Image (cartoon, grey):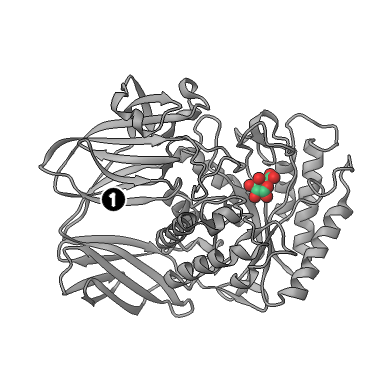
Amino acid sequence: MTYRKTQLLDGFWEFGFTAEADFSALADLKFQDLQAVPGCYDAQPNYFCQRGCGAYRRQVQAGGRQMLEIGAAGLQYRVYWDGQEIFRSATPYLAEKIIFSAGEDGTHVLLIAVCNLFDRTPSSQFQEFYDFYAYGGIYRSVRLTAMPAHYLDYCAVTTRDYRTGRVRILLETAGDVPAEATAEIFCGSTHFMIALQQGKGESEFLVPDFQCWSPDNPALQQLQVRIAEDTLEVTFGIREVKVEKAKILLNGQPLQLIGYNRHDSHPQFGAALPSALLLADLNMIKQQNCNFIRGCHYPQSEEMLSLCDRLGLLVWEETLGWGNGPEALADAGFQSSQCRQAHLMVRKSINHPCVILYGFLNEAHTHLPVAQELVNKLACVIRAEDETRLITYATCRPAEDCCLAAVDVLSFNIYPGWYDDQTNQFFQPEVIEQALAKWSTFASEHYPDKPLLISEIGASALPGDHSGLRWSEEYQAELLLCVVRYIRRDQRYSGVALWQFCNCRTYVSRGAQARPRGFNNKGVVDEFRRPKLAWQRLTTLLQK
Ligand code: ADA
């Protein structure tokens, strides 16, 4: 049996930076500094909020066929092996696998150049107007694995019947693929073969001694796949997610999702969250009795999904996007990048039982017919890969939206009591109740078969303001409590993702939308995770 040899390349890399420069600055760059990988250089004091070209460099011992995995980097990056470019990306937050030939066994130089200047073309995946900070850096772990000539490229295990533990396993191999090969599967006391034709094969089997996965019992299963030269360990869960009579059912039981939108964001680490901080965030959310996280507004890390599998938190995964308008939606480059993101996001998520919803295009202009083509394409890309999860996207114009026929679940971003009517100084519960009642009736009238979520709702609170007026901790707490109480009462709702778990860095000047201190201050905990009143009150409410 052959196990893969993986080197985790996280640590301190040599670093050089030129402000206001693009990749053309690389030739003259001096490596005078060190940066941590994962890390965002523009969250660090030396380069705070600067834009330009940064390069990370280190030596690596390797040879032959290798797979370089970059968990995420942005905004754009290029990868060089001994000075030769082997990959380039303009999609931050997307995990990439690069298969390349590392040459002779020995010491080589790996350089990842990152540019955080904004791409202002319509095909750009991270536009300047997004309401979260566009960090520069290597956001997630980097790994290098020696690959055999013929290797296991993809293994998806999806539930066919959660009552009997019947699953479907799909295999794909790559590299020097023989016309025929055999894969062996070991799962507990079960052992069987799958015939591979041109590197592809599939089968169904019963998982022995299984327990179903759910938030209350996050039971995970394991299997091992072996081909002649390669072995892969796969962790998966057995559970069913489906829609019936406008409800989301998990293992036959209706779900009531209560949780948060959560950004990977911290003032000191940017979008590169250390593992301990990630675990602390997820533990807080779980221990508050929430069961749901919307991973806004980009694909989540492998680490985050594995943790949610283990803790029993349900996840909405979505492609990177924010308020994209007609120019982007119609742009061939934007479309193909979104489709590639969706494809890779699904393949990365498929064995994670925590993922129940796939989303895309947060608050895009889906009220315009021009959006229909891309929405339909994305739904097709996702369904072609995985029919065991539900599709949604968050719209902020539900009544005018013209793409909702494509989704399984309706998700509305609404801000009653915040953006809707700015005349009230103090919190007025009827504003929230009337808005939630209105959208529940709207959904029943127009989309009677589709479950309904509130995918964003909230209010800003500046820590220490106890005036009770807008922007105070009291105002936010009362608003969010009112929302949760209402959602629990109104059976039309399948749940809510409150906006948002923690304050996240954005930009001070966002036109009419005030962003004091350069943060989106709607977190129920601040950017350092210090609880606001809303956190405390929600904790008490959710214990009941
Ligand atoms: C939108 C958007 C969020 C955030 C929020 C707000 O709904 O989806 O990313 O910007 O508004 O705080 O205004």
Quadrant for the C terminus in the image: bottom right
Q: Nearer the viewer, residue 200 or 188?
A: 200
Q: Within 10 Å of the Cα at label 1, are there few (<14), some (14-19), or many (20+) other Cα atoms? A: some
**Amino acid tagged 1:** Ile
The residue lying at 89 percent from left, 43 percent from top is 424
Q: Is residue 312 visible?
A: no
Looking at the figure, which quarter contains the N terminus? bottom left
- Give the residue at mark 1: 98
Q: On the rendered structure, is 402 left or right of 436?
A: left
Measuring from the top left, give residue 431's x and y in whole percent. 86, 53
Q: Residue at x 38, y 30 (%)?
A: 54
The residue lying toward the viewer, choosing from 107 and 245, is 107
Residue at 67% in and 32% down: 509
In this view, the residue in front, 52 or 472, is 52
Task: Using residue 468 as the reference point, say whether residue 140 is left or right of it.
Answer: left
Q: Residue, x 40% and y 62% (percent of image)?
A: 347
Q: Position of residue 439 (x, y in %)?
A: 78, 64
Q: Position of residue 130 (x, y in %)?
A: 59, 43
Q: Position of residue 311 (x, y in %)?
A: 51, 54
- Side (left or right) of 491 relative to 355: right
